[in-house]
Image (spheres, grey):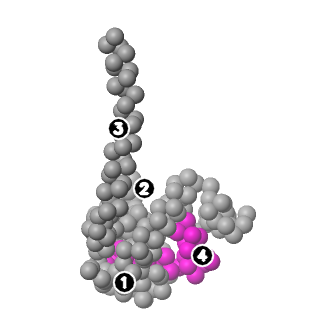
Amino acid sequence: MADTRFWRWFRTIPIVCMLAVCIASAGASLLPTQIVRRVFYPVEHADVIERASQRYGVDKYLICAVIKCESNWDEQAESSAGAVGLMQLMPSTSAAVAKMGLVDSSTYPPDNLTDAETNIMYGTAYLSYLQKNLSSRDQVIAAYNAGLGSVSKWLANGDDISSQIQYSETASYLVRVNEAYDRYKQFYPDGIQSQG
């Protein structure tokens, strides 16, 4: 008898969980846009992002989306692979960007990647470099994660990068960055400086 009651109760757990998720989703959709964007899609260092966007010709919403997905706005973030800062740059990448003359290394030392402005300048310069070598935003996003060499190999099989990606991490990254990009455009239609 007790065994039957347990199983009857146990079967209700998934229903209760689904109900809780539905209620939470409905509640989140009712939250004012201002709260949602500040909690889930914040923008920090907007002035630096604007300057970097203008200097390097990179969409400011893309910069925000990359930062959101790479570090969730944590300036001190460091990956197990050694990527550092807001845009999770490898020191070798920032050194290469400096060597190409894309960033003034006397103003922004390539080894100072935990400094928000320095990191944003190098990350945006690298995105600009990728834009000049690739033909779509999806290709640029994939290359930011997997490297230009990998994306170039995948593109040899066709132009649709999303169907050519061979790394699950990169496929997931492409989806996440595009989702964040869309949300930043939705929540900041008047620009990333707008707080109202």
Q: Is residue 118 above or below residue 28?
A: below
Position of residue 61 in the picture relative to residue 139 (left or right): left
**Disc on the earlier residue, 3 or 2:** 3
**Disc on the earlier residue, 3 or 4:** 3
Compare residues 29 and 37 and report the one nearer the observer. Answer: 29
Give the extent of the magenta segment.
115-142
Check disc 2: other Cα within 10 Å, few if <14, some if 14-19, many if 20+.
few
Residue 17 pos. (x, y %): 36, 40
- Residue located beneath label 4 in the image: 136
**Is there CB contact under 8 Å for labels 2 and 1?**
no
Figure quadrant of the C terminus: bottom left
Figure quadrant of the N terminus: top left
Check disc 1: other Cα within 10 Å, few if <14, some if 14-19, many if 20+.
some
Q: Is residue 157 above or below residue 45?
A: above
Looking at the rendered image, the disc whose residue lies closer to the viewer, 4 or 1, is 1
Report, in whole angstroms, how far the alpha carbon at label 4 lies from the one at label 1. 22 Å
- Residue located beneath label 1 in the image: 191
Asked which secondary structure carries label 3, the reply is helix
Looking at the rendered image, the disc whose residue lies closer to the viewer, 2 or 1, is 1
**Is there CB contact under 8 Å for labels 1 and 3?**
no
Tell me which amino acid carries mark 3.
Answer: Val
